[in-house]
Structures are given as C-alpha cells and as structure tokens.
C-alpha cells in the first residue's frame, strides 16, 4: 500500500503540497499553543471571551494556512540567481566556490531507489486528499440529511410552544421569521438553515415537558439563530476538513463549539432568569434520553452535559491557573519557534522548487558546475571556465603542455541528473563541433566551447521533471599540428561524469585537509591531489577510508564539506 502511494506521489504537485502541509502543521500548532497559554492565563474568562479568543486563533490559523501556498507563488516569482561568470570581486569568488561543483559532488551515493523526503511528502499529500474527500462526503451527507429532516418536518400544533417562540423572537430582536416544526427524526431541539432558519422539535417534546422547561430550551436555540451559528458552524466544518491533519486546529475547533454552546447557555439563562431552571430543563431532557450526540445540525447537544451543568451552577470558566502548565506551554513555544524558521524555509523552498517544474520554470537558482582540469594523455590543461544560466559553458582557458602546437579541440558537456535529489539517472551528453584553435607549446588561449546553450540546459531540466542537475565540462578530442590526435568516446549510459569521460576517481587522504587548513587561501585557484593531479574550483572528492566524508576544493585548499553544503 505504501509503495503504491509512493509511486503515485512521484507527481511534483503532490510533493510540493506535502511540503506545504508540513509548514501549515507547524504554523497551526504554534497558534494552538498560544491559545492554550491564553486560556491558562485567563482561567476565569467568560464564555464570550473564550469564544472570541478561540475564533481569533482559529482565523489566524486559517490565514497562515492560506499564506503557505501564496509564499510558494512568491518564491516561484522571485528572480533567479545565476552562476557568477568569473567575477573578480571577493563576493563573486565566494559565490563561485559555493556554486561550482564537479561530477564528484555526490560521490559514493547509493543509486538504488529509496523512499526520499519528497516521496514521503507526496504520500502525505495523497493521504490528505483522501481524507478531504472522505470528510467532504461525510459533511455533504450530514447536510443532505439535515435538509431532508427539514423538508419532512411538519408545523408544531402546540399553541404554548408557539407563544413561547413568539416571545423569544421579539425579545431577541430577530428580523427573519423562524419556522417552528416538529419531527420524529430529531432527539433534541435543533436549528436548520441560516437564511430561512427552522427550529425543529422532537415530536413529543411539548407533551413530555412542561412549558416552563420548554422555554429555556427554545431560548438556547433562538440564541443560536440570533448569532447565526448555523452558518458559522458550516464554514468552520469546511475549514476542519481542509486542516483535519492538524491536531491544533481540531482542538481549537472543539473549543469554538464548546464556547458557542456556553454563550447560548448564558443567553438562555438571562432569558429565563434562573440558572437552576435552565439546568433542570437540560437534565430533564437528558433523563428522557433525548440528547443526541451526533451533530448533523445545530442543537442542544453540545459539550458534555455534566460540564455545562457544572459551569452553570458553579460559574466556573476554565481550569484554574497552573504555573506548571504555563511553563510547559512556554517551553513548547520556544521549541516551535526555534524549529519553525528552519521548517518553513526548507519546506517552502523545496515546495517552490518542485512546483516550478510544472510550468517549465528552471528548478535550481544555480547549477553547480565543474570541469576536467587535465585529462590523461590529452596534453592540455583547462584551468579556467565560467558558467551562467544563459551561457552554461562560457569561455575556457586552455594551456598547451606539450612541445607541439594544438590545432583544434572538441568539447563535451555532461549533465548529471538526480531524480528527486536522491538517485541518479543516465547523463545527458552535448558534444561540440571540432573547433580550430592555435595554441603554441607552453602558451594559453581562451576558447569558446559553443557546446551547450541555456535553452538546451533548461530543456534537460524540464525533461528530467525539474529535478536537480549539475554540469561537468571536458574534452573529447585534441588535434596537434603534426597530425597526432587524442580522442575519447563519452559513455551516454553512465550516471557519473567521471565514468562518462573515463576519468580516474581518486580518494584524498585525510592529511591533505589538515595540511591545507594551515595554509592561506588562494582565490580562484585549483587544488592538487596526492598524485599531483589538479581539481577545479568546487571539486568534491571522497576522503580515503572514511565512507561518507567529502572534501571540496575552495580557493586552492581542500576543506571538509557535505553533499550539498560547503
């Protein structure tokens, strides 16, 4: 089952949705803790204050939930940051060292498919969609059932009930007429509808309860009508469905419904003038086994009856103030605040990158790149190459290390592709025409490879589903004036540029990082391994005998790094 969901979750929209849900979960949890802390501090708050605080917190949670996709849109519309093109400023050199990365950027990474964070996010989105569908069908079923009850209900024939309803209608200043109906399908007085509300009573309610007990119960329902709680409950139910995965939202929603009933209880008490009389009506109704715990409509069945009775008789709002509870909330708030920035940045960033591929936009704000400084047997050394989005393979500086002039060269661009950032796919190769050049022995020349355009690079990104890519540049052919030719045939089935160009894969001894740590940095300089071979700026190679440990070439020094950082 999980495997099937993971396969379905390969869609970028689902993955982006899953990351956004994580942000929403964190944000709504923060709001829920704040409300809980307020309720602890204001332990004697009135029902109206409790309701107002819960509604405000619930509304803030909804606004934050709606802001998460908007943040994604804003992130997608932000201008892209391109690779530095060999700038001479210190800022340009620093950015170049972090953006550049050769094919060994993910050396030793397992190629087998695994359940990545993106896949987990996709599965979470699938589960969320299924939950929304199920809960929506449940809400629609309740709404259809309530509409059917109202349609089948008949007018109440008891004149006493009509007199009580008329007095309450006038006392509460209601403008819209309220139909007084009866139905055997309800077990407690209930309100259905908000534009043309109907107050529906159990068929035998007026026969089994005295008129002085019917009045407080009707007063409670008329309070719901005056407050338009039916509409508020419907809108709240829709929000509950969309945010059902957040325990904090579910808890805040229960507090709203609880406080809503308390507010109507208070208005019923004010209307009938005696809390004991209203409590007697509630308990009598319960003793007749007419309280319905299902809630397809607004009715007298709110929070637990014993809680409402205790509150009315003892005038007790919330549990008493607790320093220990408040300290726990403070600690939880600190923990959420500390983790929230990282969660939000990582989630919104990853979601925006995934969603960018749906419109064909470039996924990465910069493409890591590297180049082969010296390919064995070629006789030339490439020691400088620039890259930008529009010119992925810019001018390259080549030095002739032989005693014969170089007459022409051919370049190859290898695009390394990562599916969901976890496993690699076969490389894409772009080979240039044979470019005529004249490089004397020991001399250098700047050559424009003309091997890959920005449009071609973006096309590869789109064909790869918007996944992560990085670029590596090398030579496939060098011709000399005396007719000698050095040539290699790139391997299109390789997943690693070094394999594609038959480059030796080296491992650097740990002592090189210790040695280089004591030396001064040399801006924009290459690094040398234990065999004297040069590595381009940004090259990443594994450390010998230390699986998973990598070092990067930064300004002529080998420094320890991780897969995606410095």
Image (spheres, rainbow, N blue to C red):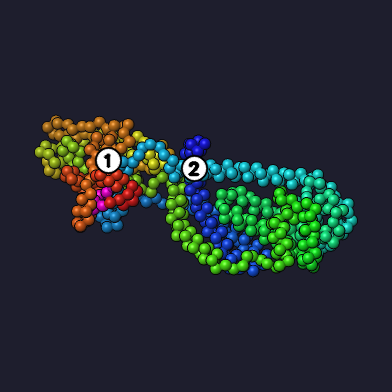
Examine the image and state in which quarter residue 47 appears.
bottom right
Residue at disc 2, secondary structure: helix
Q: Where is residue 260 in the image (x, y as percent from the top left)?
A: 69, 59
- Which residue is painted at 43% across and 55% down in the image? 342
Residue 274 shows in this picture: yes
Residue range (magenta): 550-559
Residue identified by numbered label 1:
473
Residue 451 among those drawn in magenta: no
Q: Which of marks 1 and 2 is in front?
A: 2
How far apart are the alpha carbons under marks 1 and 2?
34 Å
Give the number of the disc on residue 550: none
For this rendering, which residue is in front, 566 or 514?
514
11 sits left or right of 108 in the view: right
For this rendering, which residue is in front, 198 or 505?
505
- Dominant secondary structure (helix, strand or loop) of the stretch shown in magenta: strand
Which of the two discs, 1 and 2, labels the residue nearer the N terminus?
2
Examine the image and state in which quarter residue 173 appears.
bottom right
Residue 97 lies, with reference to residue 173, above or below; the image says above
- Which residue is painted at 64% across and 56% down in the image? 254
For this rendering, which residue is in front, 484 or 125?
125
Q: Where is residue 240 in the image (x, y as percent from the top left)?
A: 61, 51
- Which residue is painted at 63% across and 50% down in the image? 238
For this rendering, which residue is in front, 454 or 164?
164
Residue at disc 1, secondary structure: strand
Q: Where is residue 485 in the image (x, y as percent from the top left)?
A: 17, 31
Residue 481 lies, with reference to residue 154, above or below; the image says above
Residue identified by numbered label 2:
122
């Amino acid at each position: 089952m999980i495997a099937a969901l993971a396969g379905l979750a390969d869609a970028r929209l689902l993955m982006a949705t899953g990351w956004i849900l994580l942000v929403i979960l964190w944000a709504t949890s923060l709001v829920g803790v704040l409300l809980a802390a307020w309720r602890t501090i204001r332990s004697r708050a009135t029902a109206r204050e409790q309701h107002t605080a819960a509604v405000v917190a619930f509304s803030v949670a909804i606004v934050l939930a709606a802001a998460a996709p908007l943040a994604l849109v804003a992130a997608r519309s932000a201008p892209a940051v391109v690779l530095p093109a060999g700038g001479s400023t210190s800022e340009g050199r620093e950015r170049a060292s972090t953006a550049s990365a050769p094919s060994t950027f993910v050396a030793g990474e397992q190629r087998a498919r695994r359940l990545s964070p993106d896949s987990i996010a996709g599965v979470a989105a699938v589960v969320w969609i299924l939950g929304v569908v199920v809960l929506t069908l449940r809400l629609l079923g309740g709404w259809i059932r309530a509409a059917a009850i109202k349609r089948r209900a008949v007018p109440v024939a008891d004149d006493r009930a009509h007199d009580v309803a008329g007095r309450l209608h006038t006392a509460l200043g209601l403008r819209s007429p309220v139909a007084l109906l009866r139905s055997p399908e309800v077990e407690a007085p209930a309100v259905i509808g908000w534009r043309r509300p109907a107050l529906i009573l159990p068929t035998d309610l007026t026969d089994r309860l005295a008129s002085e007990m019917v009045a407080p119960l009707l007063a409670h329902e008329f309070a719901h009508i005056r407050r338009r709680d039916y509409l508020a409950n419907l809108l709240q139910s829709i929000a509950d469905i969309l945010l059902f995965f957040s325990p904090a939202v579910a808890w805040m929603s229960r507090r709203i419904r609880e406080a809503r009933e308390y507010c109507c209880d208070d208005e019923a008490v004010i209307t009938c003038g005696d809390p004991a009389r209203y409590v007697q009506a509630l308990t009598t109704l319960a003793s007749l086994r007419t309280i319905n715990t299902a809630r397809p409509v607004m009715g007298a069945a709110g929070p637990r009856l014993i809680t409402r009775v205790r509150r009315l008789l003892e005038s007790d709002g919330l549990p008493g103030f607790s320093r220990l509870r408040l300290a726990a909330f403070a600690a939880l708030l600190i923990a959420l605040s500390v983790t929230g920035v990282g969660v939000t940045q990582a989630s919104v960033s990853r979601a925006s990158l995934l969603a960018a591929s749906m419109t064909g936009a470039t996924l990465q704000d910069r493409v890591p790149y590297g180049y082969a400084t010296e390919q064995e047997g070629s006789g030339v050394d490439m020691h400088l190459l620039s890259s930008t989005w529009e010119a992925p393979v810019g001018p390259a500086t080549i030095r002739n290390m032989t005693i014969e002039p170089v007459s022409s060269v051919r370049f190859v661009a290898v695009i390394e592709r990562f599916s969901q950032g976890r496993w690699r796919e076969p490389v894409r190769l772009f080979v240039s025409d044979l470019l005529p050049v004249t490089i004397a022995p020991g001399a250098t020349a700047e050559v424009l490879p003309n091997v890959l355009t920005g449009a071609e690079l973006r096309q590869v990104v789109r064909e790869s589903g918007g996944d992560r890519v990085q670029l590596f540049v090398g030579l496939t052919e060098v011709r000399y004036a005396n007719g000698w030719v050095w040539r290699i045939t790139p391997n299109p089935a390789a997943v690693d540029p070094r394999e594609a160009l038959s480059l030796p894969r080296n491992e650097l001894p740990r002592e090189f990082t210790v040695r280089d740590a004591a030396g001064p940095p040399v801006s924009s300089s290459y690094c040398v391994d234990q065999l004297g071979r040069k590595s381009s700026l940004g090259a990443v190679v594994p450390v010998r005998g230390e699986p998973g440990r990598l070092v990067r070439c930064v300004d002529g020094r080998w420094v320890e790094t991780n897969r995606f950082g410095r």
